[in-house]
Amino acid sequence: MTVLRGRNFLQTPGPTNVPGRILNAMHRPAVEFSGPDFVELSRSCFEDLKPLFRTSDEMFIYAANGHGAWETALVNTLSPGDRILVPHTGNFSAAWQRMAESHGLVAVEVPNDWQHAIEADAVEEVLRADQAHEIKAVLLVHTDTATSITADVPAVRRAIDAAGHPALLMVDTIASLLTVDFRMDDWGVDVAVGAGQKGLMMPPGLSFTAVSAKGLAAAEKAKLPRAYWNWGDRLEKQNYRWFCGTAPEHLIFGLREAIDMVNEEGMDAVFARHARLAGAVHRAVEVWGQAGALSFNAAVPEQRATSVTTIHVADGIDIEALHVLLREKFNVALGYGLGTLQGRAFRIGHMGDLNEPMILGTLASVEAGLAACGIPHEPHGTSAAIAWLAEQAQR
Ligand SMILES: *Cc1c(COP(=O)(O)O)cnc(C)c1O
């Protein structure tokens, strides 16, 4: 086996780089989970996660990945046979929909080409037609990691209101949280789903839901079976219930450090850094694409995510060869194309604990990989990224 020195560049759109500070915070013995110190530490995490979602609503933390939090949103608020509205944002709306259907929920779909953000007008039209209010929830993915497109959440809120429809608005922020502004309360979101291993820089294993008063009221009437995920139990006073059993202590130690790191940098600075680094990736892809073999999945520049970029490759190009070369020769990991984009695209993740030299190293490695694999591309994409970052640094 080849020995690779230096740092691995983990440019997948999750998990992302885990900073040494977070790893170190977790490197300690287990503690008594009912002791006052740990109870206070967990309480502080429930409280201090709220500002990251810009909410004062109820917060739940699960020892689960994002799929777990998806499931909690469904089983706590809905009943068998309920209709849900699913605007197609990409592979992640499709996966959340399949999970809903496996619980006996009935999806009403708003189709989309995966290259554009969903149209709020189309959502409004479907809701207006639902005179009997059979649709109980709208399931919206904020940034779909497969398409690298960010949806306009406030526009969907306005569409629901314009239709005078009472459906809950549930938003998956897993790939957008701490990469772009998300305002749960201002935007009228009822259930926000998040996870730790993307913008929040955590090792995988924690996920969250923030739930509005309307979402909690729906939970009182909802009939889908639930035990481990039950919000009602998790709201009990006894801290053993908060995690429905033993607290994932080490992940909570890490979470505390992650929240502190975000607050030290400041959320606005975090968003600005993501926009800057995404800009560098976009400049490079624009140039590479001029040779005709590579192109953005997201057709509209303003809709491109700050957390991940999906790049189409022309028919006949063996994209696996690029992944293997980057992994084995350069120690760089990229994301694969997902769903209908499998084998037809690759993805560069650019979220979490990341700075300019890391993004430039990634782009230069990808450019070298494209050359080594004989994938047609206009050279000097990395130079365009350098010029962009130089310009940004003068601000
Ligand atoms: C990563 C991701 C998920 C799934 O999260 P897991 O932790 O892998 O279960 C869901 N939605 C979006 C938008 C994601 O990026």
Image: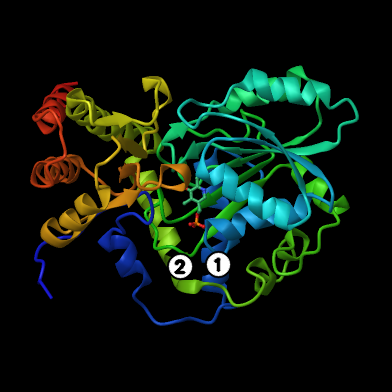
In the rendering, at what x and y percent does residue 276 appear?
Answer: 26, 30
Q: Which residue is mark 1?
A: 63
Q: Is residue 187 among what the camera can see?
A: yes
User: Left or right of 5: which side holds 140?
Assistant: right
Where 243 falls versus 323 (above or below)? below
N-terminal label among 1 and 2: 1
Dot 2 amino acid type: Leu
Q: Is residue 358 above or below residue 311?
A: below
- Between 275 and 133, the residue placed more toward the observer is 133
Which residue has dot 2 on it?
A: 251
Q: Position of residue 224 (x, y in %)?
A: 81, 58
Q: Nearer the viewer, residue 333 or 264?
A: 333
Name the image quarter holding the N terminus: bottom left
Q: Is disc 2 placed on a helix, strand or loop?
A: helix
Q: Secondary structure at mark 1?
A: loop
Query: What amino acid is at disc 1?
Result: Ala
**Can residue 59 be seen in this snapshot?**
no
The image quadrant of residue 132 is top right
Q: Quadrant of residue 297?
A: top left
Q: CA distance from mark 1 to mark 2?
A: 8 Å
Determine contact: label 1, label 2, CB under 8 Å. yes
